[in-house]
Image (tube, rainbow, N blue to C red):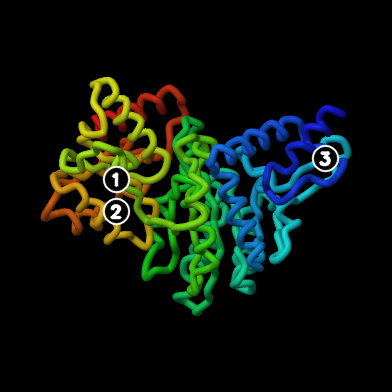
Amino acid sequence: MTEAKRAAKKAGSGGMAGQAPEGFTVHPKLVRQFEQRDKLVADGEVDWALGEALALGSLLVEGTNVRLTGQDTRRGTFSHRHAVLVDYATGAEHVPLAQLSGGQFTVRDSLLSEYAAVGFEYGYSVVSPDDLVAWEAQFGDFWNGAEIIVDNFLVAAEDKWGQQSGLVLLLPHGYEGQGPEHSSARIERFLTLCARGNIRVAEPTNASQYFHLLRAQVRTPIRRPLVVFTPKSLLRARQARSPIEAFTSGSFREVLDDPIAGSEGFDRAGVTRVVLCTGKVAYDALGRRDEALAGAGGGAGAVEVAVVRVEQLYPWPKQAIADTLAGYPNATEVVWLQEEPENMGAWNFVHGRLHSLLRDTHSLRHVSRAESASPASGSAALHRLEQDDLLRRAVD
């Protein structure tokens, strides 16, 4: 226990908001996690969890109240957040972000009744329009218990009654082979409810994008609900980290170009196919493309397939997509890649929008899982086969 106390004092709260109180014993496993986070920052990088803490902390320092609730939200379903530290010896609690001066920070684990919890948070966001109010599902598809709130209030209240809300829904989403109940936050359901700029739907793929998205939610004059499809495996993935300078300047970008586009020797004129996608599958596609390049002994100048991330699905970023595609003058084919089955995901929403944008300049096709009654396979082995097939058809 003495060794744990000594390590805890050294690691403190992992850079979240000062040090843990004198004599407070952080769990030894968390000490190691915070030490790794400190090392990451020392190397000039920030991961997803710390990017979120920076967004919340900066808003608090600026005087904005932050309310974060959900099903296992204090720790984080994937053991990444740890907004509340529990003394390993006494059970006492310490909330690092609550120690910041300025706004008030509230973090609570909500009961397992999405209908009640989301309804309450929606009402809270209406009466506290200047606060950042967010509810997080344990897995993204759990929001289906609150569909009545979403349908009747979240997406329609402004149209019906002029009632505005800035509620944020954080919905973990991504096909990781964990089965049908732990894969899809049902992007398609939200996209069918989008009209007249009523909500914002985004799937950021790195820490700085998430940081700027959360801050923009309360710094934008007009309040609209925000639905964020958050990652699972990307929470700790190297690709989703961002350099520290990305947090001190810039803003949320609706579309992210292929990361190789900034590489020395990259020839934009050599790209003949552009793959558009959202979320984790973008990194899978990039990995597949880069493996093929390495195997062929080619460098940045040999790239024929570019992978572009659509970080915001609604409002639809038509101009940002057009501008990005214009950077590939010899690309004749655009592929929409998604992990979800063909009758789910974003395809049915983006199809007409992409067709109207590309019909005179590019051919358009899509790559997805086959139509399905279930959002995902219950077999991890079948999931891997499907994923390999997706990447082969999109990238090879």
What type is the residue that disc 1 sits on? Leu
Q: Residue at x 37, y 70 (%)?
A: 196
Query: Are the two marked residues, 2 and 1, in contact with CB atoms closer than 8 angstroms?
Result: yes
Q: Which residue is drawn at 55% across and 37% down?
A: 43
- Res 39 quadrant in image: top right
Work out how far the residue at label 3 is from the one at label 2, CA to CA, in angstroms. 49 Å
Above-or-below relation of 45 to 218: above
**Badge 2 or badge 1: first in the primary sequence:** 1
Above-or-below relation of 190 to 332: below
- Mark 2: give few (<14), some (14-19) or many (20+) Cα within 10 Å: some
**Badge 3 or badge 2: first in the primary sequence:** 3
Q: Residue at x 44, y 75 (%)?
A: 159
Image mark for residue 350? 2
Work out how far the residue at label 3 is from the one at label 1, CA to CA, in angstroms. 46 Å
Name the residue tied to disc 1. 276
Q: Is residue 181 visible?
A: no
> Of residues 93 and 7, which is closer to you in this image?
7
* SS label for mark 1: strand
- Res 259 quadrant in image: top left
- Residue 222, image x and y in percent? 48, 73
> Of residues 132 and 146, which is closer to you in this image?
132
What type is the residue that disc 3 sits on? Asp
Above-or-below relation of 106 to 371: below
Name the residue tied to disc 3. 87
Residue, far left? 360
Work out how far the residue at label 2 is from the one at label 1, CA to CA, in angstroms. 11 Å
* SS label for mark 2: helix
- Residue 164, image x and y in percent? 52, 74
Quadrant housing the N terminus? top right
